[in-house]
Image (spheres, rainbow, N blue to C red):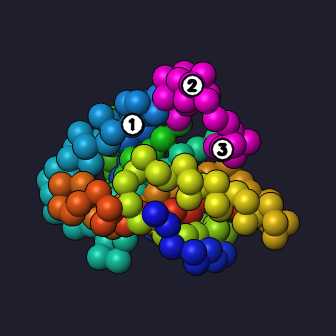
Amino acid sequence: MTQDNIQIVEVESFPVVVVRDVVSTMKIGKVMGPAYHAIKAYLNQEGVTPLDDEYPFCIYRDVTFDHLDAKGFIATLKMMFAEKWNIEMGIPSQKPLSGTETLIATNFPAGKYLQTVHMGPYRFLRQTYKRLADYANAEGIPLGTVSVEKYTNSPGSVPDDALKTIVLVSVS
């Protein structure tokens, strides 16, 4: 499901428009579509196109990686229903904007990240995060609390096994 290349990258800040939310794992997919549609409509209204070389993304804040080895029915229920994610669903913008009450104009978080590519269904992303965390542990790289998924295509445009997601985890 994943490609083996893991690298440290330096990411520059750039203007973005995001929708912030706190959701359970089960609801992430339900809030993403409407959020991206609202952002695209706002960008169109402002006469701004997304950055050409960037993709729609989701930033996960306050992330820890100590739960990746959890297995079993109870662990799965907790991850799907009880665990809440502090997320920012966003689209890069060609220029800074003012935003609205629900569409927040901000900047992508610059910094060092571990990066890899996940190929396949989103439900297997956990394995990619585990691989990143194991790599960081083996290399003595301290992970931060921000992870980012950049979606280079979407479930409506390609089969699930062809989904390509760039995964970044901040390095502290």
Nearer mark to the viewer, of 1 and 3: 3
The residue that mark 1 highlights is: 28
On the image, which quarter does residue 31 sit in? top left
Q: Marks 3 and 2: CB-CB under 8 Å?
A: no
**Picture coordinates of residue 97, whole percent (x, y):** 33, 57
- Sequence order check, earlier mark of 1 and 3: 1
In the rendered view, would you say 101 is above or below 73? below
Q: Crowdedness of circle 2 by 10 Å Cα count: few (<14), some, many (20+)?
A: few
Q: Secondary structure at mark 3?
A: loop
Q: Amino acid at mark 2?
A: Phe
The residue that mark 3 highlights is: 68
Disc 3 versus disc 2: distance between alpha carbons?
14 Å
Q: Amino acid at mark 3?
A: Leu
On the image, which quarter does residue 134 sit in? bottom right
Question: Horizontal placement of 111 versus 2: left or right?
Answer: right
> Front-most of 116 and 113?
116
- Sequence order check, earlier mark of 3 and 2: 3
- Sequence order check, earlier mark of 2 and 1: 1
